[in-house]
Amino acid sequence: MNGQAAAGGVLRDESGRILKAFVGNIGEPSITRVELEGIVHGLRMARNEGYRRVVIQTDSQTVVELIEGAEERHPHFLAVQSALRLLDRDWQVRLVHVFHEGNYVADYLVSVGHRLPLGFHFREEPDPLLNY
């Protein structure tokens, strides 16, 4: 690894089947910032796909708390604002904390993201290793 963090996420249907996956090599060493960027990217992707009921899961309690009440002087406030603008639209989004041990899909995607060029990349046909 090169001191940079990566993000990853999936869009699933109601039964849990993965519809799309994305990974991002953010080029940013701050894990909190990368988690925020991943959430923003996932929200944009869900919105663009037409989903109106979304559950965002993150293993970062820090990010959940930031989105629920970041102060303007926080170093990642602009990223938090991007998330809040997306959350404040005509759809239902629930942000929930999950334990790191239960978030292995994101961990796998992050390991892939470290090997990719900078930026976000997505797949219509998710990696079969993601389906469990």
Image (cartoon, rainbow, N blue to C red):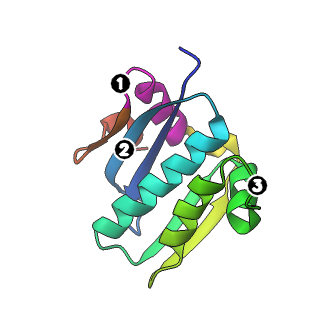
Residue bounds of the magenta highlight: 105-118
Q: Position of residue 33 (x, y in %)?
A: 61, 43
* Residue 43, magenta (yes or no): no
Please state, as top left, top right, bottom left or bottom right, where the N terminus lies in the image: top right
Q: What residue occupies the far bottom of the structure in this picture?
A: 90
Q: Nearer the viewer, residue 91 or 103?
A: 91
| Tag 1 residue | 116
Identify which residue is drawn at 35% across, 73% down: 51
Decide if residue 52 is on the left or right side of residue 3. left
Helix, strand or loop for the magenta stretch, by majority: helix
Identify which residue is drawn at 43% across, 56% down: 42
Determine contact: label 3, label 1, CB under 8 Å. Answer: no
Say what secondary structure mark 3 lies in: loop
Q: Nearer the viewer, mark 2 or mark 3?
A: 3
| Tag 2 residue | 22
What crowding class fits label 2: few (fewer than 14 Cα within 10 Å), some (14-19), or many (20 or more)?
A: many
How far is the residue under mark 2 from the one under mark 3?
A: 30 Å
| Tag 3 residue | 73
Task: Of the two numbered discs 2 and 1 on the same chain, state the one appearing first in sequence.
Answer: 2
| Amino acid identity at mark 2 | Phe
Determine contact: label 2, label 1, CB under 8 Å. Answer: no
Q: Position of residue 41 (x, y in %)?
A: 43, 53
Identify which residue is drawn at 42% across, 37% down: 24
Q: Position of residue 118 (x, y in %)?
A: 38, 29
